[in-house]
Amino acid sequence: MQSEEFITVWDLPLRLFHWLLVIAYFVAYATEDEWLNVHVWAGYLVLGLLIFRLIWGFVGGQYARFNNFLCSPMQSIAYIKDLMQSKAKRYIGHNPAGSAMIVLLLLSLSMTVVTGLAVYGADKDAGPLAFLDAGYAHLLEEIHELFANFSLMLVIVHVIGVVVESYIHRENLAGAMFHGNKKRP
């Protein structure tokens, strides 16, 4: 039973998406060369989760919808400046920095998946892009690794942002992504 002082912000489908994406990405990252089948299936799971998130961004709960949190880059920069001065406004849903991070992560992970499919097609003659010329396999692999590593860097910045935001606003944002609730304003 939910207390009167809390509000459900992150619905169950969004929370499942988040943690499954964390697991699938790290499994894919850790199994890059040694266990190709595991790597490929983890990549397919990331693809499916990204498709789900795109759909959920339009039909999901209030705080999951893109129209609830997407903002301009200038709003994100202004928020980060306020955050560095410890005067950032608290948001119930995603703050402007979180909004920018979501967009960057979704784009970077999408590029990681697309280039991964391309490498799999060109190098192994497998998957939906099996028709790709093997001559491009090395270039595609370099691009794939670039986006996988860029995604990892974004994840690290995201975690740091969650820690800083949790400290400044005195709330456990990571916990909220498990149980879904945050304190009311």
Image: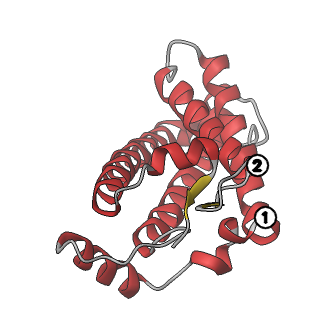
Classify mark 1: helix, strand or loop: loop
Residue 94 location in percent, x, y? Answer: 52, 68
Determine whether, in the image, residue 50 is placed left or right of residue 116: right
Q: Work out whether mark 1 precedes mark 2 in sequence or the reverse, and give the earlier one.
A: 2
Few, some or many residues within 10 Å of mark 1 (<14, 14–19, 20+) = some
Q: Which residue is mark 2?
A: 13
Residue 154 location in percent, x, y? Answer: 38, 52
The front one of 157 and 12 is: 12
Look at the picture and state if 183 lies above or below 140: below
Instruction: Give the amino acid type for the residue marked by disc 1 in the picture.
Output: Gly
Q: How is the structure coloured here?
A: secondary structure
Give the residue displayed 70% in from the left and 41% down from the top.
Answer: 16
The front one of 149 and 66 is: 66
Residue 27 location in percent, x, y? Answer: 55, 25
Instruction: Give the amino acid type for the residue marked by disc 2 in the picture.
Output: Pro
The front one of 109 and 160 is: 160
Give the residue displayed 51% in from the left and 12% down from the top.
Answer: 34
Determine whether, in the image, residue 116 is placed left or right of residue 77: right
Classify mark 2: helix, strand or loop: helix
Look at the picture and state if 128 lies above or below 27: below
Look at the picture and state if 64 lies above or below 79: above
Determine whether, in the image, residue 87 is placed left or right of residue 130: left
**In the rendered image, which quarter is residue 166 located in?**
bottom left
**In the rendered image, which quarter is residue 20 located in?**
top right
Cα distance in 3D space between marks 1 and 2: 8 Å
Whether residue 122 is visible to the viewer of this picture, yes or no, is no
Q: Residue furthest front?
A: 4
Asked whether the residues under the numbered discs 1 and 2 touch, taking CB atoms below 8 Å apart as contact, a structural biologist would say: yes
Q: Which residue is mark 1?
A: 60
The front one of 132 and 50 is: 50
Q: Residue furthest top?
A: 34
Whether residue 20 is visible to the viewer of this picture, yes or no, is yes
